[in-house]
Amino acid sequence: MLYLLLVLFPISMAASAFVLRKKSGLVIFMALGAVLAEMLIAAQIPLDNPSLFLGVTLTLNTLNRMFMLLFLAIGGFAFVGAWNLPHGESFVPIGLLLLSQVCAVLLLQNPFISTLLLALSGLTAVLVMVDLPTDTIRLVGTQAIAAALKYMVMMVIAAILMYIAFVLATIFRIGELPGRIPLSRFILALLAASFSLRLAIIPFHAWLSDLVEHAEPLVAALVITLLNMSSLLVLLVSFQTFPTLLTDNEGPLRMMRYGAMISALIGAGMALGPGSLRRTIAYLILYDCGMVFYGLSSVSSIGLAGAVFGALNQTLAVLLILVSLALVERPDGRAPGVVRRDLLRRWPVAGTGLLAGGLTLIGIPPLSGAMGRLLIYQAAVENGWPELLVLLAATVLALLALIRIANERLLGPSEDKVTPDPLMLGETELDRPAPRQLAPEPRSTAALTLILMLICLTVGLYPGPLLTTIDGAIRELAFIRAL
Amino acid sequence: MLINWLLIGVGITATVVLLFRDWRLTIPALLLNYITLALFSAEQQFIASDVDLFGGISTLVMVKMITGLAVTSILSITALTFSREYGLENLDEFGLAELRRAARTAQRQQASQPFHLNDYVMPFWAGVLALFASTSLPYVYAIAPTPAADFAWYWLVFTGVLTIATASDLLKIGLGLLLCTSGIDILYTAVVSTVKEGGLNVIPLVLLSQFHILLALAIAYLCGLLYGRLKTLELNELYKQ
């Protein structure tokens, strides 16, 4: 019953929120209430207590509960951010629908159903990408439509490949059908392609850079954090359901690792090249996706722990970066259309959030990304020093890219210093217009940014409890024991 | 030699979607594709019949037909209502001027685009390629329990992918995606129905139907948005902006 409540309650709340969507404040409060209720329910569900519903098993393990609570918290943070940051009319209802779908993905351990739910969540996300604020006088941007179309096509193709892989895995028996491409290799190739599409591994990354560049930052944050990371958990479930795919596929797994390394390296390299703030951030996220995928492809307990820790870190870092980005892009009272270089002085909290988010994403201590990155490097050492060197080179490039955007956009001198002209003959101080007062950062969003930074710092300083949970959950996976 | 007319129906209707650009042809072809595919899965007896209709068919076949009807209704209604204007009352002068300019551009483009045989050359050869692959793969890499089922799913997936690759408008991309989805639908039904342990489950089947309908809705929504914005569904206009 509780399982169904976790899935159906956000849907009913989404329907109510859609009806009331023009009353933005009320809808945000409703959504926050729903998220809190969901978190309470998720915390109370007994672990590893499977229940059968229409022939499908619903269960919640330690790892999935941790991610479910994280996703719900991320959803809650996004709704708080929506109080001040720009978003579409249906952002909150669609956000609730996405949360419901993600909860269902985490509860249903059936690969076919998970694939379809991921595909459905992708289609739901398309609606929010082209959504405009209530009573807007703007037209929807053609680039936003193009980004949504690209995302939809990529996600449907990913779902199709994944579905074919799972159908093949259902009939796969080791040693059957000799004389043709081994089925296990074919299935792994299909899975690698489909999850690369979902996790935006280069060269399947085009949707992510367009999404970050043309959609509202809050929308991009929800899509990248909720949908990408739930895909990663589905890949873990796939390995768990079909462990035979990993036993005789050393070559294809090596190729997957190489692909992930190249993706991280190219992503970081592209971030270093000239580009807008949004595009640079998108490339940094691509770099991180490559690193996480490397941990996953290493299929060792250390690598997987690193990938899961990295995924958790990515959800926090991406939300922090994109909320900060939305804050620094707000109209700031100064002349529009000028590329500002003093964003840290103008928006101190958001500027710091952007920097801290970037450092977290790259895995610089003492922030939360460091532990996951260390585990991934350790997994790389197990596979040989050249692989570690490539990953380290990617990290150095990503760090240089972050320094570049900090230098170009954040750390410049204040552009507000106005040297007062001397008083003209007969003019007094009272004749002059009042000095311009620029609006400060909205309190609730600044508080949200600070909280996210604090979480990143706390997890970075005390990673022990999380690491123990993740490590325990990884060691329980059957395919890890088999390997 | 026994001719499977339903399989030929599946093949021809998918070819129409691949070759033609006019929605008045492609959407009815998609509907016929759904119907023939549903009847094909009934004929292949992947699922035992439980409805006393047309000599006995299964509920699943009915569900697939209803899904096809829903999908094509969504797309047809969207296509029929393209000319209507929505949400213009809130737009400022700049937005309205931009819409008028887009309408003029689209009108000029339509007037200067007569029938060109060249437009059909790429889809035609793509169709030939798909036919070659779909007839050879069931023997080279058989997956489904019968060669006919293998041909059906390979053909649908290949024509779908090639429809997307050769598409020049947004609706065509959507139709290609729907064909691919039909391909995996028949593959799942054919393969998983033969597995002794587990077998077909109602939830994936329900979700597959829901996926078809949501995909159609997403395509219709994007088509409506694009047409409302540029007065055309042409992709080159979308990427020109």
Image: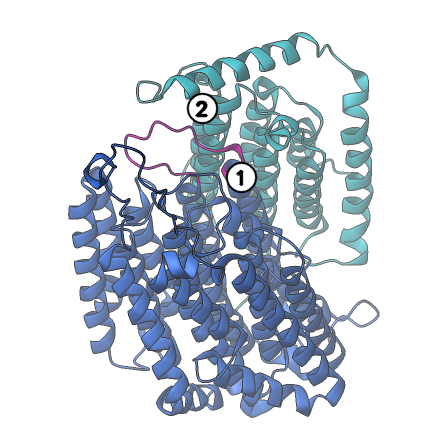
Chain colours: A blue, B cyan
Q: Would you say residue A444 is visible in this rendering?
A: yes
Mark identifier at residue B38: 1
Secondary structure under the numbered disc 2 in the rendered image: helix
Q: Is residue A248 magenta?
A: no
Mark identifier at residue B78: 2
Give the quadrant of the C terminus of chain A: bottom right
Tell me the amino acid under the disc marked 2. Thr
Q: Quadrant of residue A268?
A: bottom right
Among the two numbered marks 1 and 2 on one chain, the one whose residue lies closer to the N terminus: 1
**Which region of the structure is painted magenta?**
A130-144
Q: Chain of mark 1?
A: B
- Magenta stretch prevailing secondary structure: loop
Residue A107 at x, y percent in the picture:
35, 69
Q: Would you say residue B193 is visible in this rendering?
A: no
Q: Residue at x 56, y 38 (%)?
A: A146
Front one among A451 and A379: A451
Secondary structure under the numbered disc 1 in the rendered image: helix
Q: Chain of mark 2?
A: B
| A78 sits left or right of B172 in the view | left
Front one among A325 and A482: A325
Q: Residue at x 37, y 80 (%)?
A: A457
Give the quadrant of the N terminus of chain A: bottom left
Tell me the amino acid under the disc marked 1. Ala
| A384 sits left or right of B81 in the view | right
Foreground tag (1 vs 2): 2
Q: Is residue A133 magenta?
A: yes
